[in-house]
């Protein structure tokens, strides 16, 4: 006996990826619904590679009564309206937007990192999915924190345009083409040219000079991993279609050698260590696309601080950073709380 699952925002990048991953992982669905805005109503979308076509339902008229789980990939605006409605109708919401992440009575979950946090979902019937850049980082940090206690994190991100949705990817493509053929380049989605450039600005600026994306990495890491960890982030948009990369400097309470860290990461859930000290002995975004792992390379000791390490972390932001983590939360929820049959 399976679950009745609704994917809200099913026609967007993350929503489509959720459908793909539900099919790939053979999530036990008795019924699956693709739900989206009125403009997509009546169109059809494929359920992974099963060959099954789903007719898109209108979110404005969808009744969540009797549905077990709703995976929301609709953005904060629609989520604010419809997630509480779904939750009140007895459907557990797993939300990919930033809306509920820092609410104290909503668990923020990465299953490899803080699975026990999911037990708090009953307070509001809502579970939050973390920011894409946070999700991959905490998967890499958790086993190292358990081993030696992380005191401080300094992270610089190299985030792909897919993190800004289809419009971001389209802008990278159109600007790249325009440059090659000599047409003018007009930034629309991003504040500056993204093709053949990098932009140290993701989301809005805050009063302290950081951006909201950087703030998210700080507060979400503390909520998921440990509130005592000091975190500072610089988040940069780069001309990559899919896959976020991060350069992470860590300071530990106890000594942890690079070799010991490699051994720990090699066995850690969700991690894939690819760390050969030779040409090409590391992972880049192009190689992580379509994979669910968090790839870790370039592990080395940082001589500028006591008990310091540096590492390079890469993951498919549409999968582990969003859709895969949401499905893993659904799987965890099923094992711990919504057992069927």
Image (cartoon, rainbow, N blue to C red):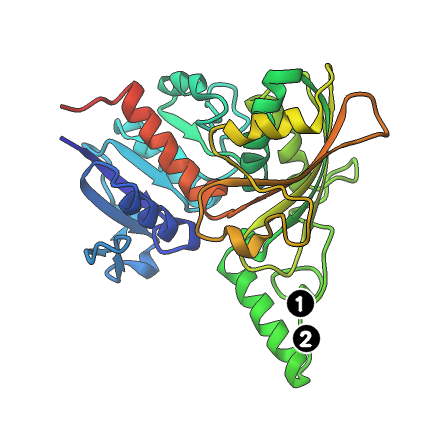
Name the residue rendered at 69%, 60% in the picture.
191
Name the residue rendered at 73%, 34% in the picture.
300
Callout 1 secondary element: loop
Count every numbered label the image shows and give the total.
2
Q: Is the Cβ of the residue at disc 1 closer than 8 Å to that at disc 2?
A: yes
Q: Quadrant of the N terminus?
A: top left
The residue that label 1 is drawn on is 195
Q: Is residue 38 left or right of residue 97?
A: left
Q: Which mark is residue 296?
A: none
x, y percent for residue 278: 68, 49
x, y percent for residue 317: 52, 47
Position of 210 relative to 87 (above/below) = below
Position of 55 relative to 157 (above/below) = below
Q: Is residue 220 visible?
A: no
| Image-quadrant location for residue 37 | bottom left
Task: Identify which residue, 165 or 330, lies in the foreground.
Answer: 330
Q: Is residue 277 left or right of residue 49?
A: right
x, y percent for residue 79: 42, 40
x, y percent for residue 144: 62, 23
Distance of mark 1 from mark 2, alpha carbons? 9 Å
Name the residue rendered at 40%, 39% in the picture.
81
Mark 1 Cα shell of 10 Å, populated few (<14), some (14-19), many (≥20): many
Callout 2 secondary element: loop
Name the residue rendered at 67%, 34% in the picture.
215
Q: Quadrant of the C terminus?
A: top left
Residue found at the far right of this picture:
304
The answer to which of marks 1 and 2 sits earlier in the sequence is 2
The residue that label 2 is drawn on is 185
Q: Is residue 188 left or right of residue 28?
A: right
Q: Is residue 73 visible?
A: yes
| Image-quadrant location for residue 306 | top right
Position of 32 relative to 65 (above/below) = below
């Amino acid at each position: 006996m399976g679950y009745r699952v609704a994917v809200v925002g099913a026609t967007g990048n993350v929503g489509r990826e959720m459908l793909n991953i539900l099919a790939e992982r053979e999530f036990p669905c008795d019924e699956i619904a693709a739900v989206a805005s009125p403009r997509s109503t009546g169109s059809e979308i494929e359920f992974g590679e099963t060959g099954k076509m789903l007719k898109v339902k209108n979110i404005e008229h969808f009744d969540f009564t009797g549905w077990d789980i709703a995976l929301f990939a609709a953005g904060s605006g629609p989520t604010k309206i419809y997630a509480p409605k779904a939750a009140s109708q007895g459907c557990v919401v797993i939300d990919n937007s930033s809306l509920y992440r820092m609410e104290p009575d909503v668990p923020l979950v990465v299953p490899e990192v803080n699975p026990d946090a999911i037990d708090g979902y009953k307070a509001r019937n809502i579970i939050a999915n973390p920011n894409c850049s946070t999700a991959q980082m905490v998967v890499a940090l958790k086993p190292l924190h358990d081993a030696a206690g992380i005191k401080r994190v300094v992270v610089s991100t190299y985030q792909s345009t897919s993190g800004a949705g289809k419009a971001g990817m389209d802008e990278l493509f159109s600007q790249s083409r325009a440059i090659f053929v000599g047409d003018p380049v007009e930034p629309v989605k991003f504040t500056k040219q993204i093709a053949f450039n990098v932009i140290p600005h993701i989301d809005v600026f805050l009063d302290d000079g950081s951006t909201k994306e950087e703030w998210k990495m700080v507060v979400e890491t503390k909520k998921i991993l440990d509130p005592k960890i000091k975190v500072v982030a610089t988040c940069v948009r780069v001309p990559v279609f899919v896959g976020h990369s991060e350069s992470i400097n860590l300071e530990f309470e106890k000594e942890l050698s690079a070799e010991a860290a490699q051994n720990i990461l090699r066995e850690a859930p969700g991690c894939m260590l690819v760390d050969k000290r030779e040409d090409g002995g590391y992972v880049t975004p192009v190689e992580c696309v379509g994979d669910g792992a968090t790839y870790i390379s370039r592990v080395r000791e940082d001589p500028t601080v006591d008990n310091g390490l540096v590492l390079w972390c890469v993951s498919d932001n549409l999968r582990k950073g969003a859709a895969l983590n949401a499905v893993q939360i659904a799987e965890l929820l099923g094992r711990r709380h919504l057992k069927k049959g």
